[in-house]
Structure formats: C-alpha cells, structure tokens
C-alpha cells in the first residue's frame, strides 16, 4: 500500500494519506490520545495536495500568509504556516459530513522543518500522480 506519512518533529502526531483511487483517498490523523480516519472526496482536486506541498517546498525559505487546501465537501482542510526560523506547521481538520447526525471534528498540528518539504512534495507526487 502506498502512503504519504507525515510525523511531527515536535510531538507524536502523525498524518497519513493513503488509498488514493479515483475521486477518493483516505486520511488518518493520530496521536497517543486521539485519532480519526476519514475517506475524503477530492473530486478532481486530490492533486491540489501535491501542488500545496510543491509550492511550499519551492518557497522553503518562507512565504507570506497561510497555504491552504480544502476538500470539495470540507471533510479535510490542510493549512501550512512557516515561521522565520524555517519551522513549518501542518494544521489539519478532519470532520464528519456537514449536516450529518452526531457531527464530529478533529484538529491537529504537527511540526516539520522546511528542509523536509522537498521530500514531502516528492512523496505526494508519487502517491497522487504516480511520479516524483
């Protein structure tokens, strides 16, 4: 099984993307005291995650504002922020179907170093596009 696994350099938070096929993929977010797994409907924009990480890798010395990708139905949101020291924060929000019964939501952040972005972008391209 092919997957993109992001592990925090600051904590035990892990985000894993897998099971890419057609318009869907799976995301799992876990730490010692919480976890969530969700099938995400990306329609035609699953490769937007590839663009998100590729753009961040290209601008690894820093960028202004936040870089954001959100799925069509808002079940997954990924936000990238960087500080002046090159520490990247990957913030994710995974949630149940909006308007569904008993809604839930999990938010987590993990830390990466800017130097890791190139490898993350390559792995994302392999997972979604079959290349790198």
Image: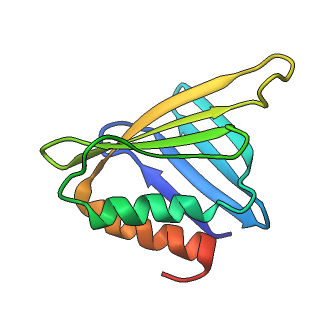
Horizontal and vertical percent position of residue 112: 31, 49
Image: 128 above or below 69: below
Q: Residue at x 32, y 64 (%)?
A: 57
User: Position of 81 compared to 12: left or right?
Assistant: left
Q: Nearer the viewer, residue 91 or 51?
A: 51
Image: 37 above or below 24: above
Which residue is outermost to the bottom?
131
Which residue is outermost to the right?
101
User: Position of 66 compared to 49: left or right?
Assistant: left
Q: How many marks?
A: 0
Q: Quadrant of residue 4?
A: bottom right
Q: Residue at x 70, y 46 (%)?
A: 72
User: Position of 28 compared to 38: left or right?
Assistant: left
Image: 31 above or below 122: above
Horizontal and vertical percent position of residue 86: 18, 49
Give the colouring mode of the picture: rainbow
Q: Nearer the viewer, residue 80 or 1?
A: 80
Horizontal and vertical percent position of residue 3: 60, 64
Looking at the figure, which quarter contains the N terminus?
A: bottom right
Q: Residue at x 61, y 81 (%)?
A: 130
Which residue is outermost to the top?
102
Q: Residue at x 52, y 73 (%)?
A: 125
Horizontal and vertical percent position of residue 107: 53, 28
Which residue is outermost to the front?
64
């Amino acid at each position: 099984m092919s997957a993109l696994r992001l592990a925090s350099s600051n904590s035990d938070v892990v985000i894993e993307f897998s099971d890419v096929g057609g318009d869907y993929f799976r995301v799992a977010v876990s730490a010692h005291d919480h976890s969530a797994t969700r099938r995400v409907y990306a329609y035609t924009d699953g490769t937007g995650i590839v663009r998100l990480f590729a753009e961040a890798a290209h601008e690894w010395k820093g960028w202004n504002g936040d870089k954001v990708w959100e799925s069509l139905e808002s079940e997954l949101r990924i936000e990238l922020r960087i500080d002046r020291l090159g520490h990247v924060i990957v913030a994710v929000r995974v949630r149940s179907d909006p308007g569904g019964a008993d809604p839930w939501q999990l938010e987590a952040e993990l830390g990466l170093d800017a130097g890791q972005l190139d490898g993350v972008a390559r792995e994302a391209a392999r997972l979604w596009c079959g290349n790198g």
